[in-house]
Each structure stands twice: as structure tokens, then as C-alpha cells.
Amino acid sequence: MARYIANGSPRWVSWGTGEYDPLEFLSSLDWLMRRRLSSVVLSLFAGSNNPVKELSEALAIFREIYSDEATRSRDTVVVEVCSGRLAPVATLTALFIKRGEGWAIDSRDMDPRLREVSQKLGGKLRLFPGVDVYSRGFEEVVREARDRASYLVLVAIHSCRTLAVRILEVFKAVGGDRLLLVPCCAKPSWARKVVGVEVRGYWDWVYALWSYATHVLNLPARVFVAKGMLSEANAVIEVRC
């Protein structure tokens, strides 16, 4: 990622914008297929609107989590925010991280197949349907996870507009250990008012969120491109505390 100055303020441009690498996705898929319970994960995506893209996103983020030694050596809770009906990252965590639990939060109901998986895994996979991210209930769930975990990871894939802002703020408030946030649709009026960034494209929005995390919330944030995600919106804002 390169940085440049425009109109007196810093901006980012990225060689990664719009770039993804199918080989990285295939590497992640191979990793999954070699595991005994891979069929459980794959079955959740049957009938999905865009199963390959959605699976690529989940695997790219989960492998970032899985590669972290702290995740595997401590009592970890991975909270997937705006998890959708499938909650794939929470499910992958419950299945493949021995000391890990996956918690899934979404404002909608969960897929019946996911509820069946949750029942079989017991407390390893917890579902919180009907929880609005802007509600007090959302923060209460995350605080409960904080109390339970020795290592707390928040994940949000394609969180639109100020949902991303809310997730950053709650992560800061509860004292999470790691955040992996994939921004999606922008909220230009918020970026202009709060951090003085004119949003004309995806990477301006990523920069606005990074700037808010770094300069307003004082979080040690960095941005990288997850090329294994088969999506042009594949920037990840990562915070490690």
C-alpha cells in the first residue's frame, strides 16, 4: 500500500485495490478439504447466492485467526459480528480451534442448518440471532465474551457504513485483543464530518475508518489486503491490543 499527500491531507492508494488471487483461495480450500469436518462447513454454503465468494471471505479471515499462536494456545472466543445466516467464521472456529469458541451475532435469524450444527457442538458454537449491533444487547454479548475469554477476537466481514464504526467503538470499549474488520459500503457524510475525509471510492472509506481507529480511538490499527477473498472489497483493518 502506498501513501501520498493530496490537498494537504494524507490519502492511501493501494496496489491491492480490486486485486485478488484465486490461488490463495485454492490454498485455503485445500486446507479446509484436508480436515475431517470440512463437509460440515461446505454444507452450510449449499444454496447460498454466491457460495464461492462467501466461502473465500470466511476462509481468508479464519486462516488469519488460525495462524495466530495466541488463538490456539489460549481460551479464545471469536465473536463474528453481522454474521449473516451462516456465521462461517464462528463455525470454523468452533470446529477447528481446540480451545476456541465461536459466537455469532446477527440482527436476523440463523439458518436452520446452522442451529443444528450449534446443537451438536454445544457451547463451542453460540448463536445470538435478533441482536442489533446498535443496541445495548450487542455490547452486553461482547462483554460476556470478554469475561469468558482469555483471548477475545472480533470479526466483521463486509460491515457497511457506520456498522464498521460501531464495531470499532465497542471493540475499544470492551478491551478486545484482536479485531479483523472488512469494510464495505461507505458513509461519506460521516467520513467528511468526523475525520475530514472526502470519500470518492472504497479505499477512501477504508482510510477514513483507519484514521478514526488510529487518531480518535487511539487503537493500533493497520490495513492489509486479503487476496484470498474473491471480492474487490478485500481490505482488512486489523487491530491487536
Image: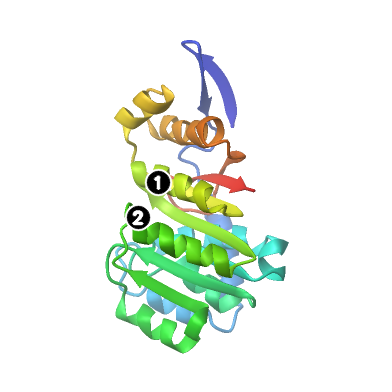
Q: Is residue 166 above or below residue 35?
A: above
Residue 199 appears in view = no
**Tag 2 secondary structure:** loop
Residue 62 found in image quarter:
bottom right
In front of the other: 172 or 184: 172
Direction bottom: furthest residue: 120
**How many marks on residues?**
2
Q: In 3D space, how far apart are the residues under numbered discs 1 and 2 (Cα atoms)?
A: 7 Å
Q: Are marks 1 and 2 in contact (CB under 8 Å)?
A: yes
* Dot 2 amino acid type: Val
Direction top: furthest residue: 7
In the rendered image, which quarter contains the N terminus? top right
Q: Which mark is residue 34?
A: none
**Which residue is the site of mark 1?**
166
Residue 134 appears in view = yes
Q: Is residue 192 above or below residue 54?
A: above
x 45%, y 31%: residue: 208
**Which residue is the site of mark 2?**
133
The tag earlier along the polypeptide, 1 or 2, is: 2
In front of the other: 143 or 9: 143
x 64%, y 78%: residue: 98
The colouring scheme, among rainbow, by chain, secondary structure or one colour, is rainbow
Q: Where is residue 68 shown, x and y percent of the image?
A: 68, 60
* Dot 1 amino acid type: Arg
Q: Where is residue 119 shown, x and y percent of the image?
A: 42, 87
Q: Where is residue 4 shown, x and y percent of the image?
A: 56, 19
